[in-house]
Amino acid sequence: MKALVFNGPRDIRFETYPDPSLKTENSVILNVERCSICGSDLHMYHGDNLGTASYSDGVKPFCVGHEFAGEIVEVGKQVHRFKVGDKVLASGGAPCGECSYCLSGHAQLCSGWTAFGLSTGLNGGQAEYVNVPMADLTLQPIPEGISAEQSILLTDAMCTAYFGLTRTGLLPGEAVAVVGLGPIGLIGVELAFILGASEVFAIDPVANRRSHAAGLGATALDPAQALPMIMDKTKGAGVPRVFEASGAKAAVELAIKIAGRGSTASFIGLPQPDVQLPMLKVLFKDITIRAGVASVIDQWPHLIPLLQHGRLKAEGLFSHTMDLSEGAEAYRLFDAREDNVVKIMMNV
Ligand SMILES: [Zn+2]
Ligand SMILES: [Zn+2]
């Protein structure tokens, strides 16, 4: 098959890769129809370390990508929910299915949880075919009435946005700040209004991302003016709920600066290597810190009905559509933030 293959930092190639075969009896083989690049893929692209995984040198080539949807072409004997021909979207990764967390319904805490597309351990879905383990758990039939774009956003970005935003504890009538307006932050802005936020401060250095947020009704702010503007608007109190959706050093620092006394700040961006929490400020302002990786499958029951009833739209986030064969250029452009890129859809 053809796939986007990691050959080293900034060296992703569209090339021939061995076809996947069913790895376990609870696996399916998916013929991928569309996929997308995630901001978190850029850590691997840059050759940074991710947890214990290092991408700087000597990595065995693997297929990249954890955001994908397609049609099932083969099912293992232990798969009960799906059959050949079903159209499905995937959940970004798979738990081990055997540890105490998995068996008690807390698969998001599984230490054996593995994301697609970060090693040969679980080859990714920016490929013509991909093996998906634990299929009954990790796949979702494509819900009726949702768009191709929404189906890809349900594989990660939308779920991470909902997870991160709800962990601020936002209540109707409260103000919330969203720091970092990539696709996750922008969906977070839309969800904040759905959940009853009175005012959403949306902060990003990129002008077109701010105008997207303003179009959703947010008070869009450049990071340079965010602190004085928010302090002025809140009469010096700061914001009670802060959702940090970037992981950049400046964004994390700003999130703590604009957080009010007794506030909750929720972090989902993969932190850049040099990011540190200013603990003294956290302590004196009594800020509750939440940080974690979303359990994608647990967010679907909340998001799918919102999409199907037209409450949540998440429109206009795919700024570019390309072919999988153009994947190397897609990574380059996405990494360079050229051409006002927000998110790239790749057709397979
Ligand atoms: Zn992602
Ligand atoms: Zn487990």
Image: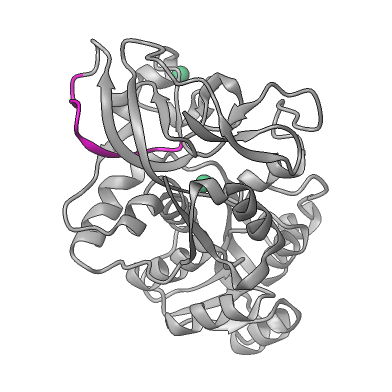
Residue 193 drawn above or below residue 247: below
Quadrant position of the C terminus in the picture: top left
Judge left or right: residue 65 versus residue 251. Answer: left
Residue located at (35% from left, 42% from top)? 69
188 falls in the magenta region: no
Give 225 or 284, whichever is nearer the viewer: 225
What color scheme is it?
one colour
Q: Position of residue 155 (x, y in %)?
A: 40, 45
Q: Position of residue 324 (x, y in %)?
A: 50, 47
Residue located at (52% from left, 23% from top)? 122
Give 323 or 224, whichever is nearer the viewer: 323
90 falls in the magenta region: yes
Residue 122 drawn above or below residue 86: above
- The tally of labels here is 0
Judge left or right: residue 120 versus residue 184. Answer: right
The quadrant where residue 202 appears: bottom right
Residue 96 drawn above or below residue 246: above
Q: Position of residue 47 (x, y in %)?
A: 77, 38
Judge left or right: residue 188 versus residue 286. Answer: left
Give 205 or 261, whichever is nearer the viewer: 205
Q: Position of residue 195 (x, y in %)?
A: 34, 67
The quadrant where residue 149 appears: bottom left
**What stretch of residues is rendered in magenta?**
80-92
Residue located at (43% from left, 39% from top)? 295
